[in-house]
Image (spheres, rainbow, N blue to C red):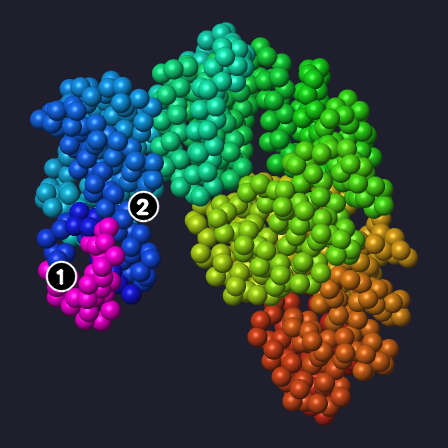
Amino acid sequence: MEAYVSGSAGLAAIVVGNHAKLYKVNSTEVIDVTINIVHQLFSSNDDVLVLKNTNKSQTIKKLYTEKNKADCLILFLSLLDDMIDFESKYPLIEHLNDIFDKDLEAYDYLCNVMFTRPLPIINIKSILDDSLLLNSKVQSLLSLLFNSQDQIKKCNELFNSICDRRKLSSDKSSYVEGILINKGFFYNFGSKQANNHFLQTIQFELIEKLKNSNIDDYVNFSSCIRTEFSSLTTVGSNEAKIHLQEIEEEGHKSERKKTIYQAKAKKENNKDAYDRVQAQIKKIREQLRLRLIDPAKRMAHELIESQLKNGGNEFAAQSLCSISEYAKKLNLFELQLEWSLLASEKAPNDYRTYGHIADAYVNLDDMNEAKKYFEICLKSIDNNHQVYGQTGLARIERSRGNFPRAMELIELALDGGVDDSAPYIFKAELLRDQGMLKEAFDIYELVSRNYPELGRAVCGKAAVLAEQKKFDDAEEVYRFALKNYRSSEEQCFIFSSLGFLLARLGKFTESHKLLDKSINLSSFEDVVPLLSKAKAFQMEGKTKEAEKVLLKTFKGRESFNDVIEQLLDLYISNGEISKASNFYTKLKEEMKESDIVQIRLSQLLKEQGEYEDSLQIIDKLKARRPKYILALNERASILKTKEKYREALLQYKAVLEINVFDRVANLGVQAMNFAFNKRVDEKSIILDINISNPKSIEDYQAIGELGLVKLSIGETENGKELLLQVKNSSFKSLHARFNAALSLAGLKLGQDNAALKAVKKSKNSVGFIQKAVIYGMQGKVNLARESLKQAEHHHPQYMNKVIEMVRNTYINAANDAIYSQEDIYHEQLKVMLIAA
């Protein structure tokens, strides 16, 4: 359905074929007209919008929004008209404020338009101080316009100069101007909020919009806009960098007052002012949650301007740090950086602002810039700032896999004698990374004694106990925490942690109850309970339910890497490659760049047979993060898929040099040994697993892997017993992974019916190959051919040989068999070990 909307005319027309229904603002009447009448009615208006694939409610809503925009523009221009007396302007102001309160989009539109050209300052000044304007959006806009006229003039002159030099006609210039107005270009530059990231976005937008226009060489024109306007950017500009260098040269001698805004407000009995600021911050957060970034930035700018006028730079910086932290929680890292940089400009002697900047750079994976700002924190005379800087530098080394250096840095932080739990918690997490669980537990124990109010330390103890396979003890500690830490935030975290632990133990009914409680207590930005819920469903083999939770979580949280990664992992591990591909394609470009999403893309390409492209992605990651174990194991997986077993073996061994306990690498080494016809070492698979009394999904996974190893060394009975343990567990997600091996064990033991039953419903390549072997042995050539055809539809390169062996032996059956049954079994086992 197509519709036409004009705000200035107050009309909307919904077209169906050669007829249309006409709607008017503030009228319930609907008029049937022909398409010719529609064209006549709308041809004289220059603000007509054409809506495609719309419906009645969307069209009517758009009509009232466009009407508000048109009214706002007329009212505001009338407000600036010196021919209208002051008393007549009062109703205009009241009407404008009413519209702004109800329709933020209209306010944004007016801002974008009014910053396009300079205005007579005297007209603004004449009404700016009127008491009727006090604390209104009209006052904020007028004040901003009054203070921005010089900048607006610069932007207007620069834009006109570019158009003149490019010999653009007035129509073409107006067309480009319209695009820029809609993107908030002149407002952002006129109010000195534009940064280089914004300018880059504008360049891409212009290229996209102008490619079908009559503007010659539109790509260079768009580039010219970016190049020439870069001199007018503020946040992150050369001036800001020079300012930062000047601060460093001065040695940061003057330390910021330590009294924060809240304390001062209370001390001066000015609680109203404090509450007003908090209310504005709350509104900014609401806009961010709705992904209304431009309105949020506009509201933030108004808040900061107000604070600069009434409270001082340090209070403005405090607010900027607060909203930048919230942007971080929403994974809006570019915005976190922008507001953090602005905070440091407003309060250059506040070292906490540099910590916020460093943290933003860490989140953006720019470790060199992060390191620079963490080092600035070390120059503070405040020990807390120094400890934060030292811990930040340790964070960088940990992310690079340089654990010894990270430990040195965190020890330096602890040597400062600061009364802060954060560096201790970081040290415990660093020890856990290296498998030093007892030492990590001792640190958590120390923190829980010294900071008894800190529930996180108690939960840290429980997490370590779970890693040590002391599941009963871990559960007991979590339940102790539930009784003693009662804030909703702590309860949310504990319910989620305990619920996920129970899911790992296969206690799904109780797990889901606890996870639901956690979800009910969680905030919008805390997605851990939802992701844990999806993981629990996935372990249970309920992939549809897991997908439903993840898709619901993703809606409105399109910038959350953890959600994106888990959805891709679910699709890929479930063999739903087309779904994974479609989901990845629709992601925003900036979300595709994170390391974990890049790894999932590499896995996706590997599943699609694009091995070189897959490997290229991982090699780029490896060059930047040479000790990133997840990427290194994936690299080995690609190499073994390409049948480059010797290179894969070397890569797995390199992982074990970083972490000798890594299970993926240990199994990978044994799989490669089997590929080279070497004896497999089962001890490297067992590690700390209690085979006689398995409890967790990790236990059963290791038992399944050990079952495969037992088959490979000829211990078929033992291998089958282990694989049956997995089959009889509640972890249906593992069944598909090991059913083919269980079937093979049955076949080797002469249990043909049990062998077929184990893979009857299998939907992966290994299972289809196993079915083809069984049917072939039974002389059911057509069924064998059909199963092999399904295996061939999509399979990795290392399965080629076994597929060929099965085809030649059972389907193209010659009189003299080329391969013995044992040859086929051996090749199948190699494939299963590699796939595992």
Q: Is 72 colored magenta in this rendering? A: no
Give left or right: position of 138 versus 544. Answer: left
Instruction: Specify the segment rendered in magenta.
Output: 11-40
Q: Secondary structure at mark 2?
A: helix
> In the rendered view, does 18 fall on the left or right side of 736?
left
> Residue shown at 18%/28% (left/top)?
89
> Is residue 672 or residue 734 the one in the foreground?
734
**Quarter of the image where the C terminus is located:** bottom right
Q: Position of residue 123 (x, y in %)?
A: 15, 23
Measure the alpha-carbon separation of dots 2 and 1: 33 Å
Q: How many numbered tags mark residues here?
A: 2
For mark 2, what is the residue?
A: 204
Q: Residues within 10 Å of mark 1 (few under 14, many from 20)?
A: few
- Residue that appears at 67% across and 59% down: 538
In the image, 122 versus 416, the foreground residue is 122
Residue 167 on image: x %, y %: 11, 41
Residue lying farthest to the top in this orientation: 253
Above or below, 68 against 62 in this view is above
| Of pointers 2 and 1, the one earlier in the residue sequence | 1
| Percent of width and height locating residue 695 | 83, 54
Residue type, numbered disc 2: Phe
